[in-house]
C-alpha cells in the first residue's frame, strides 16, 4: 500500500488525470560541454544557471513536473519563481560521467546532497540514474545502493524514481535488441519487487536496429508485464520525431507518461540569442504539448498501478509511527 506522503507527492508530479508529463534538465557535465562547444568562450557557473532557467521558464508551464539539479536548477529556480510551488519537482541524487562506458561508471552521489535534503527543500521525488546489467560483476553492489535509497525514501516518505539503463557487457558493442529486451525485462522485475516507486525507462528497442512497429509494441507490452509499479518513458537522446512515436506506443502498452529532456530542448544548446529565445518560446513548448496530448489519450494513470493509502478518519494516528 502506498503511503499518504508518497501518494501526495506522486500526485504533484502528474497531471490531474494521473499522467507524467515531466521535463528533465538535470544534465550537468555533458550539457555544459555541449554548451561550451557552441560558444566562443566557456560558460561561467552563472551562465549555466541562466541557460537552465531559460529552459525551465519556457517548459515548466507545459509540464506536470520538472527534473533538475540542485546547483544550477533548483536553487535559482525556487528563488526566481521559475519553479513555482504548484509545479512538481524531482531531483537527481547521482553524479554521472557520460564520458565513460556504462560498465565503467562508478556510482557516485552528489556531495552534500541527500534524500533528506530533497524532501526538506520541498522536492516531490528522488531520481537515480543506474547503468545496469543483471550479469555484471557489480550488480549486487548496485542492488545494495538501490535498497539504501529505497530505505531513505521510505523514511522521508518521498517517491523514488529509478532510471536503470541497460548496457552491453562488451564495451565495444551495442546491445542487440534481443538482449536489450531481456535486460529491460529483468531489471523491471528486479526493481519493481525491491520496492522502487516509479521506473524511468528507456525504450526497450534500439531504433537504429529496428523500425518495426510490431517489434516495438511487443517489447513495450513485455516491459509493462514485468513492471508492478508505474513506469514512464525517457527520451535517451533520440530525435523528437522518434520519441513522439515511441511515446505513443509505450503509453498504449501501459506507460504512465514521459520524462523527457533533450528530445524537446536539445536544439537550444546550439542556438544563441534571439534564435534560442524563439525556439524555447515556440517549438519546444509545442513539443511538450504534443507529448501531453499523447499521454492524455493513451497513457495509463499512475493511480491504476498502486494501492491507495488508508484514509479512515484516524489514519494519521499511526502514520509514520
Image: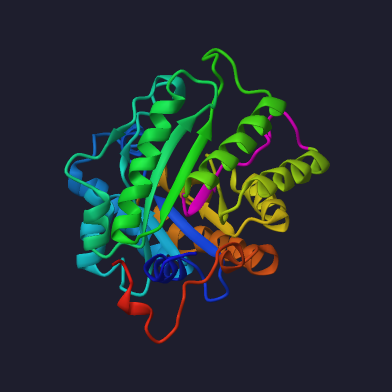
Residue nearest the observer in this picture, 65 or 53: 65
Which residue is at 35% across, 33% downward? 96
Q: Is residue 58 left or right of residue 175?
A: left
Q: Which residues are magenta?
A: 196-211
Q: Is residue 178 left or right of residue 110?
A: right
User: Is any part of residue 49 visible from this angle?
Assistant: no
**Where 58 falls versus 203 (above or below)?**
below
Q: Is residue 191 left or right of residue 248?
A: left
Prevailing secondary structure class for the magenta stretch in the rendered image: loop
Which residue is at 33% across, 73% downward? 318
Which residue is at 44% across, 68% downward? 7
Residue furthest to the bottom: 313
Which residue is at 49% across, 30% downward? 132
Q: Position of residue 190 (x, y in %)?
A: 55, 39
Which of the 4 image quarters holds residue 208? top right
Q: Position of residue 313 (x, y in %)?
A: 40, 87
Q: Position of residue 285 (x, y in %)?
A: 50, 63
**Where 290 falls versus 26 (above or below)?**
below
Which of the 4 image quarters holds residue 110? top left
Amino acid at each position: 500500500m502506498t503511503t499518504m506522503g508518497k501518494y501526495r507527492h506522486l500526485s504533484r508530479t502528474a497531471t490531474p488525470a494521473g499522467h507524467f508529463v515531466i521535463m528533465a534538465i538535470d544534465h550537468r557535465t555533458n550539457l555544459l560541454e555541449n554548451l561550451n562547444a557552441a560558444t566562443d568562450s566557456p560558460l561561467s557557473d552563472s551562465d549555466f544557471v541562466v541557460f537552465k532557467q531559460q529552459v525551465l521558464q519556457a517548459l515548466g508551464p507545459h509540464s506536470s513536473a520538472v527534473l533538475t539539479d540542485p546547483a544550477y536548477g533548483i536553487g535559482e529556480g525556487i528563488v526566481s519563481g521559475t519553479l513555482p510551488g504548484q509545479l512538481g519537482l524531482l531531483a537527481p541524487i547521482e553524479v554521472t560521467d557520460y564520458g565513460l562506458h556504462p560498465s565503467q561508471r562508478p556510482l557516485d552521489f552528489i556531495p552534500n546532497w541527500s534524500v533528506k535534503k530533497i524532501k526538506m527543500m520541498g522536492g516531490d521525488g528522488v531520481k537515480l540514474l543506474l547503468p545496469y546489467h543483471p550479469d555484471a560483476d557489480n550488480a549486487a553492489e548496485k542492488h545494495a545502493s538501490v535498497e539504501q535509497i529505497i530505505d531513505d525514501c521510505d523514511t522521508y516518505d518521498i517517491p523514488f524514481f529509478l532510471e536503470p539503463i541497460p548496457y552491453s557487457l562488451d564495451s565495444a558493442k551495442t546491445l542487440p535488441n534481443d538482449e536489450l529486451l531481456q535486460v529491460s525485462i529483468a531489471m523491471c522485475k528486479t526493481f519493481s519487487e525491491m520496492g522502487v516507486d516509479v521506473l524511468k525507462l528507456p525504450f526497450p528497442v534500439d531504433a537504429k536496429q529496428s523500425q518495426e512497429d510490431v517489434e516495438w509494441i511487443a517489447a513495450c507490452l513485455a516491459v509493462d508485464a514485468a513492471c508492478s509499479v508505474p513506469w514512464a518513458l525517457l527520451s535517451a537522446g533520440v530525435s523528437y520525431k522518434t520519441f513522439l512515436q515511441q511515446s505513443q506506443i509505450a503509453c498504449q502498452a501501459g506507460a504512465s507518461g514521459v520524462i523527457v529532456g533533450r528530445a524537446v530542448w536539445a536544439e537550444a544548446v546550439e542556438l544563441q540569442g534571439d534564435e534560442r529565445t524563439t525556439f524555447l518560446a515556440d517549438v519546444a513548448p509545442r513539443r511538450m504539448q504534443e507529448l501531453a496530448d499523447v499521454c492524455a489519450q493513451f497513457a495509463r494513470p499512475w493511480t491504476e498501478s498502486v494501492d491507495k493509502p488508508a484514509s479512515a478518519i484516524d489514519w494519521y494516528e499511526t502514520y509514520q509511527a
